[in-house]
Amino acid sequence: MKHARHAADPAPTAPRTTRSRTTAKHAGRHVAGPAPRQRRSGPTWSSLAPKSWPVSLGVGLAVTMATTTGLSVASGTTGVPHSATPDTSASGIRATPEPADSGTALGTEASTERRSELVAERSQAASRSGERSARTAPGSAGLVVADDAAIPSEDIAVDVESAPEPPVLPGCDGEATGAGTNGNISSTEMCSLWDGGPMVRADAAVALARLNEAYVAAFGEAMCVTDGYRSYSQQVAARAAKGSLVAPPGTSNHGWGLAVDLCPETYTGDRYDWLAQHGPTYGWDNPAWARPGGSKYEPWHWEFTAAVEAAGGVS
């Protein structure tokens, strides 16, 4: 009976060892494992991204993108995801944003190339501006002259006819007031002739010097002049020496500084004919009374006729 009861009893369970418990414990965790973590649901990138990305084109062709506070909160980041490449419908430029801590920049290869082109153009423009500024003359109020600028020829043409003629008698301006009396003319009214010759009134001197230039061109030498202005005392002395050949003091045109006497080699032969033809052109002439057949033949006596008539002289 005891055997039967013992047989009927369930078989005793073998006691678990520490090693087996430990193995079973680790084996159970490995097999079962914790449940996977679930991501929180929230707004997606596409739902929060703005419909358009404003593009600001400046000196560096900087591209900026607008983000929202909600996008930062939902995505759990402080910047815009680098993988986001929204298409700007307005400009057609696809821009890649940078992290929030960087300055303005271009995100795509095309934008980078364009920025480089603009920087190069800006540098070239600054260089050209510097060169032009260096060429600007002081006091020109910032005037910049282009490299291809040209001045019309009519603006630099010189009107030779209107240019002042060089003085025929250095130091003589040819101006005379006519002040004084016969034989008493101020030296300020007078000018010496070429080569230190005698003095005559300034206007008469310049006219005679021009006649002399033409004479030199025709004969290769200057006119020879013996007498010009005579003061009153000089006229008295000449009258005493030559008699009737000299006008009474106070009446001679020599006393006005408007008459000269020429050397024989200047007025004889074909030279007299030349002077008779060209002298009046310059205001000088051998008066009618002194010509051949005149009341007193003096081919050497020549006068500045226009001024003589104004002065009222006759000889």
Image (tube, helix red, strand yellow):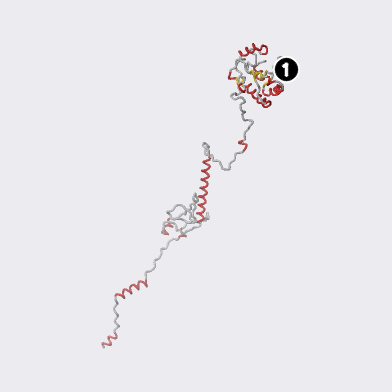
The quadrant of the picture occupied by the C terminus is top right
Side (left or right) of 10 relative to 217: left
Q: Disc 1 marks which residue?
A: 292
Q: Is residue 158 above or below residue 236?
A: below
Q: Secondary structure at mark 1?
A: loop
Label 1: how many residues lie within 10 Å, few (<14), some (14-19) or many (20+)? few
Q: Nearer the viewer, residue 230 or 47?
A: 230
Q: Position of residue 2 (x, y in %)?
A: 26, 87
Side (left or right) of 281 relative to 18: right
In the displayed orientation, state which residue is furthest to the bottom. 1
In the displayed orientation, state which residue is furthest to the right. 293
Side (left or right) of 88 relative to 41: right
Locate residue 174: give its quadrant: top right
The disc labelled 1 sits on which kind of residue? Answer: Pro
Q: Position of residue 301 (x, y in %)?
A: 67, 18
Q: Nearer the viewer, residue 290 or 41?
A: 290
Q: Nearer the viewer, residue 16 or 180?
A: 180
Q: Is residue 61 above or below residue 174?
A: below
Q: Position of residue 95 (x, y in %)?
A: 49, 56
Q: Position of residue 276 (x, y in %)?
A: 70, 22
Q: Nearer the viewer, residue 279 or 195?
A: 195
